[in-house]
Image (cartoon, rainbow, N blue to C red):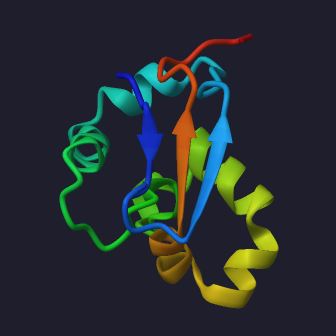
Amino acid sequence: MPEPFIGNPIKAKVLLLALNPGFEGSEAEWHSKKEFRKLIYDNIELNETKYPYYYLYEDECFKKSPGHKWCKRVFKELIAEFGAKDLSKKIACIQYHGYHSKKY
């Protein structure tokens, strides 16, 4: 599934610009999960959710996803300061190319 942006770029206080989502190999497994697909569809449609930046979603079933692991590492200090839920409302990431790949 494409991920052209993550979070709500209209309401976010900070916009991050990225080349494209990475690909480790397990993304297809995650994108095939109904709950995960719903997060992506809700995001693309800008539906209100508890965690607009869905890779910060604190649900136990998503904590092993590659995106969640990456965000926990990269945003570690910001999560400590704001909390994952509040941070997910303050940031958004726009992808130059919305499809996953091993190398841009």
Q: Quadrant of residue 30?
A: top left
Percent from the top left, x then y, of residue 101? 61, 13
- The image shows residue 41 at horizontal and vertical percentages of 22, 40
Compared with 3, 44 (above or below) is below
Residue 96 is situated, as x and y percent measured from the top left of the image, at 57, 25
The C terminus sits in image quarter: top right
Q: What count of labels does the image hold?
A: 0
Q: Nearer the viewer, residue 76 or 27?
A: 76
Q: Is residue 98 above or below residue 50?
A: above
* Picture quadrant where residue 8 is located: bottom left
Q: Residue at x 60, y 17 (%)?
A: 25
Rendering coords of residue 80 (x, y %)? 73, 85
In the rendered image, the quadrant that contains the N terminus is: top left
- Foreground residue among 104 and 72: 104
Residue at (50% x, 82% y) in the render: 86
Q: Nearer the viewer, residue 32 or 14?
A: 14
Residue at 39% x, 68% y: name it: 11
Asked where in the image residue 31 lies, by quadrant, the reply is: top left
Q: Is residue 22 left or right of residue 53?
A: right
